Amino acid sequence: MHFAVSSPPAVQPGQTIIVDVWAHLERQRAEVARRVERASPLSGSPPIIRSKGPFKIERGTTLFVRLRFPEFHVGSPEDAILWEGEIANASFEVVVPRQIVEGMKNGSVTVHSEGGLRIAEVTLQIMVVAKSVSTAPTTQPLHHYRKAFASYASQDRDEVLGRIQGMQKAAPDLDVFLDVVKLRSGEDFEKKLLQVIPESDVFYLFWSAAAKASPWVEKEWRCALDCRGEDFIDPVPLVSPEEVVPPEELAKKHFNDWTLAYRRCEVDPGNRTRC
């Protein structure tokens, strides 16, 4: 399958826009382009489709999508896609504040497995301008992760392995570095970890009371923060952040497992989501 994200390149203050995340097969690319174009019939030029893929995603897999745009108002920042081999999309309504400074605004789309682990992302840029402009929607490719590092306390190993195994069902080509699997007897433990972390696409921080108390976990997440920055770290909470407070340096990160809301919800006959 392939992923793509479509959004207008420019907006005005007070405007409401739609950001779509598409999942499709290679042969469905032209149909995705038609759907994006139909969604913006007044744009002056056809949309450009630049999908990313292919990725190995098992049919019947539910993928969770999250949109972050700090300077815009995102109505509902989480949505889900059930991949069955046909075109599917997650859609987000975004409102541009009336009182906003003009210029380029940055956001991001992330795709998560059923276990909550991030497996792909794309950075979005939308220009805020005062005057109306005729612009076609653009479609950006999602960056699919190939290498990940899992940081966890040994006491949590069984639960972490379960999460990783569930995630690799959705993304079987993602190579996750687990010390219990990757490290060989006699290797320099610290040297190997400090080498692998900067080479990874994402750093999974499995957070718990044991992880907070572990000097090795702290050494790993500090290495990740220093060499790749805050966005590189993907918290995977095993407990509530109210129960185990996250590190002050990572206070801006989302330590609640928001995908649980989708995994535990049912849809009633009136097509309203009920948890």
Image: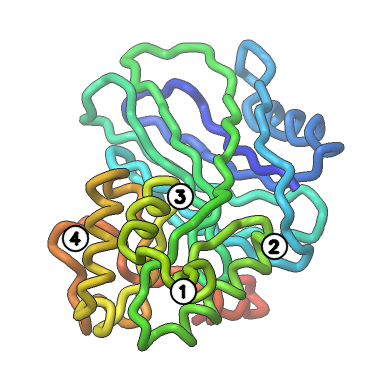
- Name which residue type carries label 1: Ser
Q: Which is in the foreground here, disc 2 or disc 4?
A: 4
Residue 247 image point, x, y percent? 17, 66
Find disc 3 in the rendering and name its residue: 200
Relative vertical location of residue 181 with respect to residue 203 in this rendering, above or below: below
Category of crowding for the residue at label 2, using alpha-carbon neighbours closer than 10 angstroms: few (below 14), some (14–19), many (at least 20)? some
Find disc 1 in the rendering and name its residue: 185
> Residue 251 got which mark?
4
Q: Which is in the foreground here, disc 1 or disc 2?
A: 1
Find disc 2 in the rendering and name its residue: 82
- Name which residue type carries label 2: Leu
Q: Which is in the foreground here, disc 1 or disc 3?
A: 1
State the residue at coordinates (20%, 70%). 246
Mark 2 or mark 4, which has the lower sequence index?
Answer: 2
Category of crowding for the residue at label 1, using alpha-carbon neighbours closer than 10 angstroms: few (below 14), some (14–19), many (at least 20)? few
Viewer-proximal residue among 132 and 5: 5
Left of 72 or right of it: where is 138? right
Q: Dividing the picture into quarters, in which one does residue 244 lie?
A: bottom left
Q: Secondary structure at mark 2?
A: strand
Left of 38 or right of it: where is 177? left
Mark 1 or mark 4, which has the lower sequence index?
Answer: 1
Category of crowding for the residue at label 4, using alpha-carbon neighbours closer than 10 angstroms: few (below 14), some (14–19), many (at least 20)? few
Mark 1 or mark 2, which has the lower sequence index?
Answer: 2
